[in-house]
Amino acid sequence: MAAAADELARAFAALTPAEWTRTAVYNLPTVESRTLLWLGRHTLHEVEHHLTDMTP
């Protein structure tokens, strides 16, 4: 898990300001165009949220 977190952090750190504004289609809960900034924030939120599911 730590290795995956490090890899994700490196991938995010490598993005330029212009790349953060690029969009992609995200399908949940509805199909919408989202920026990479939104996707990064959402990913971190989900990791934090589901990490508590794994802790006894």
Image: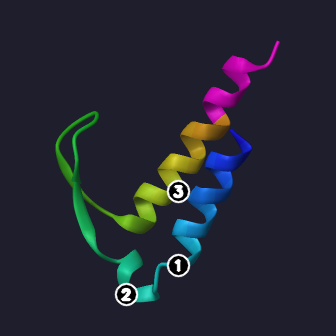
In the image, what residue type sits under mark 3? Arg
Residue sitting at x 60%, y 39%: 47
Which residue position is annotated with label 1?
Answer: 14
In the image, what residue type sits under mark 2? Ala
Which mark is nearer the camera, 2 or 1?
A: 1
Which residue position is annotated with label 3?
Answer: 41
In the image, what residue type sits under mark 1? Ala
Q: Is residue 9 magenta?
A: no
Q: Quadrant of the N terminus?
A: top right
Judge from the rendering whether residue 52 lies leftward or rightward of residue 13; answer left or right: right
Please provide percent x and percent y for residue 8.
57, 57
Please report the bounds of the magenta region as a residue range.
49-56
Which residue position is annotated with label 2?
Answer: 18
Dots 3, 2 in contact, CB < 8 A: no
Judge from the rendering whether residue 36 lies leftward or rightward of residue 33; answer left or right: right
SS for callout 2: helix
Residue sitting at x 62%, y 47%: 4
For label 1, count other residues whose C-alpha is less than 10 Å away and answer few (under 14), some (14-19) or many (20+): few
Q: Nearer the viewer, residue 6 or 41?
A: 6
Which mark is nearer the camera, 1 or 3?
A: 1
Q: Nearer the viewer, residue 7 or 29?
A: 7
